[in-house]
Image: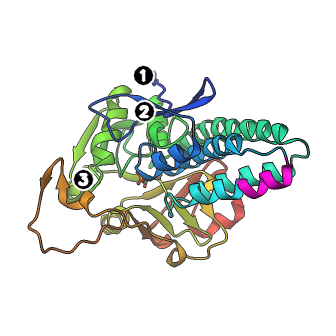
Amino acid sequence: MTSSLTQVYPIIWQDNQVLLIDQTRLPKEYTRIEISRYEDMAHAIKTMIVRGAPAIGIAAAYGMYLGAREIPTVDPQEFLIQLETVADVLRRTRPTAVNLFWAIDEMLKTAQETKGSVEQIQQALLEKAKKIHAEDIETCKLIGDTGLNVLPKSPDKLNILTHCNTGSLATGGYGTALGVIRSAWREGRLERVYADETRPRLQGAKLTTWECVQDKIPVTLIADNMAAHCMKQGLIHAVIVGADRITANGDTANKIGTYSLALVAKAHHIPFFVAAPLSTVDFKLETGAEIPIEERDPTELYEVGNTRLCPTGVEFYNPAFDVTPAELISAIITEKGAVPPGELRSLK
Ligand code: MRU
């Protein structure tokens, strides 16, 4: 055992409301905001106060309950109709992470299957949101421990490169790719994390390094375009990233920049792992070409603070995610085991 790990919970249910760590303010300020209305939850997801595929799913589940308790009817049929409107508002926040749609569907199913008064359905929805939340934390710990089995056996202590933020902040707690890294650290198998800064939102620079510092895990920040150079120098033994949506054939949508990382890892014969819960697998889609890719406001690209980086008259393209083809992925690490992408269907 190398050190004890701290626990960061980005989402807390307390006093009949949701408390979210405002991730747009980290690492400068650690603050929580209170959310008690579903439209505020939709806004928090859209503006990335809460972000990361599993965390978005949990937030949407609580958002469904918050919306459910605002519905002014005692008629269960009318209640279900109005709950669809709440679901639609939450669905329109971010298109790529399938956990959002998965969690909303789970909540709708709970509402439809609960026979009783509106009050009883609302209560069932709160219980379901809490269950999705608690299960995600347990799932992440399983992913972390499963990942230990597939990490390269040598050297004893690995340098692992990761992209974006996939830690406690991006999940109920513990993390997916960063969860594997946490487990490796706990077991004395980690030398150092190399964190890509992750332009344009800088989740690696701002959030992953923050989590590593909390846990006293050695971390080196690099700019995204330094990864190939670090690999060539022999500094990286494995790459582990998270996922926003994995299709049935193993193609994986994740934060923009993941695809190029997979290509350079392949060129340097470095294993490239994806760590994600099965709720991130969209078995309805065959290949990554079908995944909707979110495009975000170009100000993310051309503004740093209040400074504009380029002259006016420039056009912008700001896709938030890319798709890594299955053949570049060594294994997908889930709570039910780690498999090569081609065997993903066996975990369904
Ligand atoms: O835009 P973000 O910050 O929500 O994107 C997050 C990622 O791409 C993560 O890698 C992914 O959601 C997995 S989080 C465990």
For the residue marked with disc 3, what is the amino acid?
Gly
How many C-alpha atoms fall within 10 Å of the one at disc 1: few (<14), some, or many (≥20)? few
* Left/right of residue 347 with respect to residue 245 in the rendered view: right
Q: Secondary structure at mark 3?
A: loop
Main secondary structure of the magenta stretch:
helix
Residue 67 lies, with reference to residue 247, above or below; the image says: above
Write the residue at 46% across / 43% down. 50
Report the front residue among 71 and 264: 71
- Marked residue nearer the N-terminal end (3 or 1): 1
Classify residue 217 by image quadrant: top left
Residue 180 lies, with reference to residue 188, above or below; the image says: below
The quadrant in which the C terminus is found is bottom right
Mark 2: C-beta under 8 Å from nearest atom of ligand 1: no
Give the residue pinned by disc 2. 185
Give the residue pinned by disc 1. 3
Q: Position of residue 283 (x, y in %)?
A: 66, 68
Write the residue at 8% across / 67% down. 311
State whether residue 289 appears in this view: yes
Report the front residue among 246 and 117: 117
Residue 75 lies, with reference to residue 185, above or below; the image says: below
Using the numbered discs, state the Cα–Cα distance from disc 3 to disc 1 in whole angstroms.
26 Å
Give the residue pinned by disc 3. 234
Q: Which residues are magenta?
A: 75-82
